[in-house]
Amino acid sequence: MFKNLFTNELATRIGQTVEIATSSNLFEGILLSVTGNIVVIISSDGYGPGIQISIVVGAIHFVRFL
């Protein structure tokens, strides 16, 4: 149940800058898409095209909107 609420809330924030933490990584980028199991962000270091990063919803520890 919580997973559905979580992904629905993330889907309303597509296009916003987000920071997503897993147990071993911290990702920052623009929220590109959200499905039932995958969150996709586009990360850029400012020196070229962005890199798409797919993150499994179950691996997310926290999300922060910047």
Image (cartoon, rainbow, N blue to C red):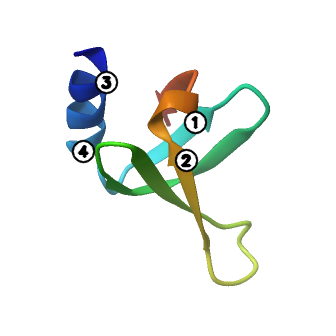
Q: Is mark 2 on a helix, strand or loop?
A: strand
User: Residue 31 at x, y = what percent?
Assistant: 42, 53
Cα–Cα gap, marks 2 and 4: 14 Å
Could you say which disc has been placed on residue 65 in the image?
A: none
Give the camera-side residue of 15 and 40.
40
Q: In this view, does 43 lie above or below 59?
A: below
- Residue at the spot of label 1: 20
**Three-letter code for the amino acid on which mark 4 is drawn:** Ala
Mark toward the start of the polypeptide (1 vs 4): 4
Which of pointers 1 and 3 indicates the residue nearer the eye?
3
- Residue at the spot of label 3: 3
Cα–Cα gap, marks 2 and 1: 9 Å
Could you say which disc has been placed on residue 11 in the image?
A: 4
Quarter the N terminus occupies:
top left
Q: In this view, does 8 lie to the left or right of 15?
A: left
Q: Are marks 2 and 4 in contact (CB under 8 Å)?
A: no
User: Residue 29 at x, y = what percent?
Assistant: 56, 54
**Three-letter code for the amino acid on which mark 1 is drawn:** Ile
Cα–Cα gap, marks 2 and 3: 14 Å
Badge 3: residue crowd in 10 Å (few <14, some 14–19, many ≥20): few
**Three-letter code for the amino acid on which mark 3 is drawn:** Lys
Task: Check the image and name the residue furthest to the bottom.
Answer: 48
Cα–Cα gap, marks 1 and 4: 14 Å
Give the camera-side residue of 12 and 4.
4
Which of pointers 2 and 1 indicates the residue nearer the eye?
2
Q: Do the residues labelled 1 and 4 touch (CB within 8 Å)?
A: no
Q: In which quarter of the image is residue 19?
A: top right
